[in-house]
Amino acid sequence: MVSNKITLSLLTFLAIFTYDPITEGIEEDSTLIARSRGMYVISALDGSHAHMLVSIVFINGKYKGSTLETQGSYEQFERRTETAVVGGTGVFRLARGYATYETLHTDSVRGYLVTESNVTILHY
Ligand SMILES: *[C@@H]1O[C@H](CO)[C@@H](O)[C@H](O)[C@H]1NC(C)=O
């Protein structure tokens, strides 16, 4: 029982940092447009939910130099999730909206995951 509790509290504080490439398409050689920079933190004692704080940092194309800030809680093992877009910089100043995500492909041997995302925002 005690060791269970220790495992659970460790899970609570697990944080995964990310700098994943964001490309136009799902192919590995698709054009790189941004990087996802931020972290995922386990936010439920049973490990079922995570909290995501991620900046989408545009590094190529017409949005180069601008960012979008995404944030939200989601069920870790669901294929489809959604988070809020709470702001942005550059051309995305005052942005608000939402992002949907769907896991299309997982390769645990390579540690490779493909997620499709649609980001819908209002900005000035
Ligand atoms: C993104 O939008 C396309 C076109 O509407 C849709 O087919 C796809 O399911 C959407 N994916 C996500 C993760 O929202």
Image (cartoon, grey):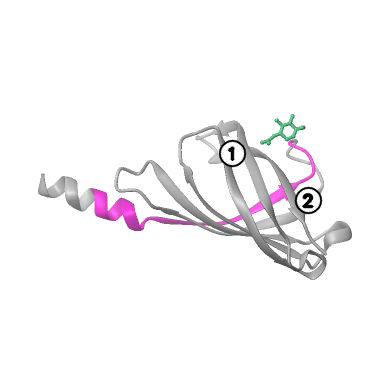
| Residue at the extreme left | 1
Q: Are marks 2 and 1 in contact (CB under 8 Å)?
A: no
| Residue 10 among those drawn in magenta | yes
Looking at the image, residue 74 sits to the left or right of residue 34; the answer is left
Looking at the image, residue 81 sits to the left or right of residue 121; the answer is left
Q: Residue at x 76, y 68 (%)?
A: 93
Looking at the image, residue 104 sits to the left or right of residue 65; the answer is left
| Residue 11 among those drawn in magenta | yes
* Magenta range: 8-26
The quadrant of the rendered image in which ligand 1 is seen is top right
- Image vertical order of residue 82 relative to residue 79, above or below: below
Query: Mark 1 CB in 8 Å range of ligand 1?
Result: no
Residue 110: image quadrant is: top right
| Residue 88 drawn at (x, y percent) | 71, 65
Determine the secondary structure under disc 1: strand
| Residue 73 drawn at (x, y percent) | 48, 50
Determine the secondary structure under disc 2: strand
